[in-house]
Image: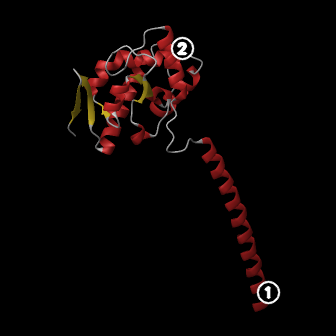
Amino acid sequence: YGTASSAVASEVEQQHRRRRRIVGKRLRRLGEIVDGMLPASSERDVKIARDVYFEGIRTQETRCVWTGGRLTKTFAVDHLLPWSRTHSNDLWNLVPASVLANQKKSDLLPSVRLMDRSASRIISAWRLIDRSKYRLLFRAQAESALLSRALPETHWETPLFDAVLRTTDEVARQFAASRWDGLTAGIDRRLPL
């Protein structure tokens, strides 16, 4: 029995090794595919939003979401929820801002008060994207990241804005992050934790 048992054990061990090699190769290939689909973690990609907002500036009055000031060709695309906290380049998270406001906000989360003051400008920015050729991408990203359901065809702005408010609050709590209350007469206003 000893020789037969060891031969069987050896065969079983060889089968296990082959399976592990095959599974390992498949997992490596799957990992490569997933890596290829995801942006590099250090990559802030705002090109689509910049193109849409640039066109908005060219054809109509587009304002900084944080200050209300009229934007020119030299504007910034701000991550509403900071990249450092969420790594989200979703179109709902990218808003037009003045260079100064974007620099001052930096990696801070907007305060609830600032979000309320800026709501109409944030929604106007979203409407620019919703009217662009990126409408389906914008909606799919918002639905997936924030709502877990479809955006209504009409009157979608309030549910989306409410979801962003909730998410902003969740991120603030999760990271014990400071909030930014905007610029007032050139003063950078940070709120304590």
Q: In the rendered image, which quarter contains the N terminus?
A: bottom right
* Front-lying residue, 94 or 77: 77
Tell me if 190 is positioned left or right of 52 in this view: left
Above-or-below relation of 127 to 192: above
* Front-lying residue, 115 or 51: 51
Q: Which residue is mark 1?
A: 4
Above-or-below relation of 69 to 175: above
- Provide residue 101's location: percent of width, then percent of height: 33, 26
- Provide residue 34's location: percent of width, then percent of height: 62, 46
Which of pointers 1 and 2 lies earlier in the amino acid sequence?
A: 1
Q: How many marks?
A: 2
Q: In the rendered image, which quarter contains the C terminus?
A: top left
Q: CA distance from mark 1 to mark 2?
A: 73 Å
Query: Callout 1: helix, strand or loop?
Result: helix
- Provide residue 167's location: percent of width, then percent of height: 37, 33
**In this orientation, does residue 152 appear?**
no
* Front-lying residue, 149 or 140: 140
At x 44%, y 18%, the residue is 125
Tell me if 96 is positioned left or right of 181 in this view: right
* Front-lying residue, 115 or 189: 189
Identify the residue at the far bottom of this view.
Answer: 2
- Provide residue 48's location: percent of width, then percent of height: 55, 26
Depth check, mark 1 against mark 2: the one in front is: 2
At x 32%, y 36%, the residue is 108
**In this orientation, does residue 45 appear?**
yes
Q: Quadrant of residue 25?
A: bottom right
At x 71%, y 71%, the residue is 17
Q: Which residue is mark 2?
A: 131
Query: Callout 2: helix, strand or loop?
Result: loop
User: Mark 1: which amino acid?
Assistant: Ala
Identify the residue at the far top of this view.
Answer: 60
User: How many residues crowd around disc 1 within 10 Å: few (fewer than 14), some, or many (20 or more)?
Assistant: few
